[in-house]
Structures are given as structure tokens and as C-alpha cells.
Image (cartoon, grey):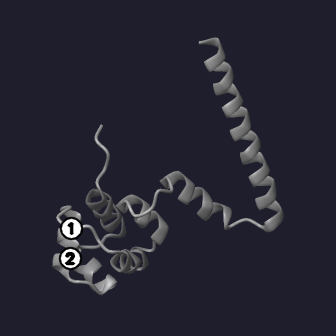
Amino acid sequence: MDKMTFGQFLVGLREKRGFSQRKLAEAANITNSTVSRIESNQVKPDPLTLEKLSQALSVEKSLLMTKCGYSEIPEDFVVIARKTGEVKEQQREKLFNLLNETIDSFLAGIDEDNKEG
């Protein structure tokens, strides 16, 4: 299966909100033709346009930045970071420790697999 383009991703977000291209353009204070060109992958939106789109669609700007290719941070990490921000400091520390233990265990398993193979 091919990787989804940013334009396709934006169409999905827009339709999920029940917006037409015109309605999204109005909500983001950009032109309708800009929305159309982004969705058809004719142009790559600049960070300011992504900020406007994120506000209009109520999604994290960091997610749009990642999907658009401005950030090297994997999308899963953006989602995890957002969710982690919703927990208390003590819970965040426990979650961080659990995540580190899980990663260490996973990497140790890879090392063992490499030794056997």
C-alpha cells in the first residue's frame, strides 16, 4: 500500500470535520485555491499555513508538520507526546520509566536475535 500524501491526509481531516474546501479556507483564513492546491499536492504548505490549518481543524500543529515533512519526529512519537502531556507529573515519570524499560528490553531482544542468526 502506498504511503498517504499530505494532501490526502488533509482531505481526510477536512472531511472528518465535515468541511468543504471553502469552509476550511474560511476557517483557516486562507484562500480556497490554496486548500485545493495543497490537497492535490501541487504545493507544500509553509509553516504559517500549517498553523492556520491546525487551528481550523483542531489538530496538533506538530502532527501536520510531521505529516508534511518539516519534522523528522515520527508521527507515533507526536501522538505519544501529546497524550503524555495529559497526565500528571508523577504519572509521566512512571510512564517514562516504563517506556525506557520496554525499549531496553526490545533492543536486548534484537541483540540476542542478531547473535543467534
Mark 2 lies on residue: 34
Q: Is residue 99 above or below residue 112?
A: below
Q: Tell which circle, 2 or 1, labels the residue nearer the N-terminal end.
A: 2
Q: Which residue is nearer to you in this view: 2 or 111?
A: 111
Q: Which residue is nearer to you in this view: 109 or 83?
A: 109
SS assignment at label 1: loop
**In the current view of this chain or complex, which residue is farthest to the right?**
90
Q: Which residue is nearer to you in this view: 116 or 87?
A: 116
Q: Amino acid at mark 2?
A: Thr
Screen quadrant of the C terminus: top right
Task: Count every numbered label the image shows and give the total.
Answer: 2
**In the current view of this chain or complex, which residue is farthest to the top?**
116
State the residue at coordinates (29%, 73%). 19
Mark 1 lies on residue: 43
> How far, Cα to Cα, is label 2 from label 1?
8 Å
Q: Are marks 2 and 1 in contact (CB under 8 Å)?
A: yes
Residue 66 image offset from top left, x and y in percent:
43, 60
Taking the image as shown, residue 9 lies to the left or right of residue 105, namely left
Image-quadrant location for residue 13: bottom left
Residue 55 image offset from top left, x and y in percent:
43, 79
Q: Amino acid at mark 1?
A: Val
State the residue at coordinates (40%, 64%). 70
State the residue at coordinates (31%, 64%). 10
Residue 58 image offset from top left, x and y in percent:
45, 74
